Amino acid sequence: MVDVLIVGGGPAGITAAVYAARAGLSTMILERMGVGGQAATTYEIENWPGNTLISGFDFSSNLEKHAKAVGSQLVYGDVTEFELGGKVKKVHTAKETYEARAVVLAMGAERRLLGAAGEKEFTGRGVSYCATCDGNFFRQKAVAVVGGGNSAVEDAIYLANICEKVSIIHRRDQFRAEGYLQRKLDGLSNVEKIFDTGVERIEGENAVTGLALKNSKTGETRELPVAGVFIAVGTRPRTELLADVLPLDKGGYVDADESCITPLPGVFVAGDIRQKALRQLVTAAADGANAANAAIHYLN
């Protein structure tokens, strides 16, 4: 049994681990896939203080190195059940049960499905949710990105460097992405912007060959030939297993304030699964520090 078990190895979870370990508590990070969370699949990060530019890979590597440097233990597994009501908290995976005196929940968020016909059928065969993971498969080919936020525009910028043409499709009349990203996008000659348009259907036989599009204002339909489509239409919190454990809002986010304290004694929440106005790397890290601080006070 450890003092603090942190579920999730993104910026929130790693920050919590660093603060808890530096306070002399035995600390374990339980991560599903790899340290870094969504940051690990981000091409470039330009809004982390102290780094004008750092790749998502390097950023995530630094997180892991820091956690290990302060003595945090890192283990991998996909959580199947939480038992958080007792004094000893239990987190189950398919192979192990981990026990702790306090738990910080920092599972983060994952990309939402688009909901278009053919999406599930062609996932892994032209439909992707990670441009930095799969973009190289479409080198010198035409691809599409669906979405209008930071992630979508970042994906389009990344793909424009390796693909022949990138069409970015957004259902509204303007992007929601930050201005500096939009200015970068404007400077790319092989990017086509398609506004007020939705994807009706993802088409293909053995793999994606195109998209059926519909303009929401004119009703006009068109076919867009592409070899791949990258979905970036927002995220959803990874809180399915918490539905009967903690109070969640309508969006599935844990209802907790800046203290990161939940109604369950010894259970704290940090990062993108917490209800808040702004979800960024720095706000995730701030949550991690607050959650660790609350856990330290609880255990003392």
Image (cartoon, helix red, strand yellow):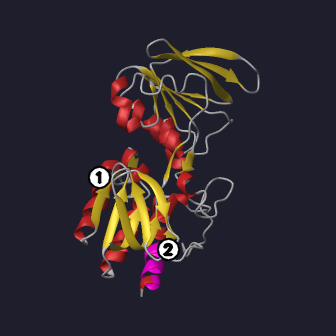
Query: Residue 72, image x and y in percent?
Result: 28, 68
Q: Is residue 254 above or below residue 201?
A: below
Q: What residue sits 61% from the left and 20% below the top? A: 201
Farthest bottom residue in view: 300
The residue indicated by pointer 1 is: 58
On screen, residue 169 versus residue 39, left or right, reads right
Left or right: 246 as drawn, with respect to 271: right
Q: Which residues are magenta?
A: 290-298
Percent x, y for residue 224?
A: 56, 17
* Residue 291 on the magenta span: yes
- Residue 270 position, x and y percent, is 49, 65
Is 213 covered by the magenta stretch? Answer: no
Mark number, residue 86: 2
**Tag 2 and tag 1, C-beta contact below 8 Å:** no
Q: Quadrant of the C terminus?
A: bottom left
Earlier sequence position, callout 2 versus callout 1: 1
Q: Secondary structure at mark 2?
A: loop
Label 1: element kind: helix
- Quadrant for the N terminus in the image: bottom left
Number of numbered discs present?
A: 2
Q: Could you say which quadrant of the image residue 299 lies in?
A: bottom left
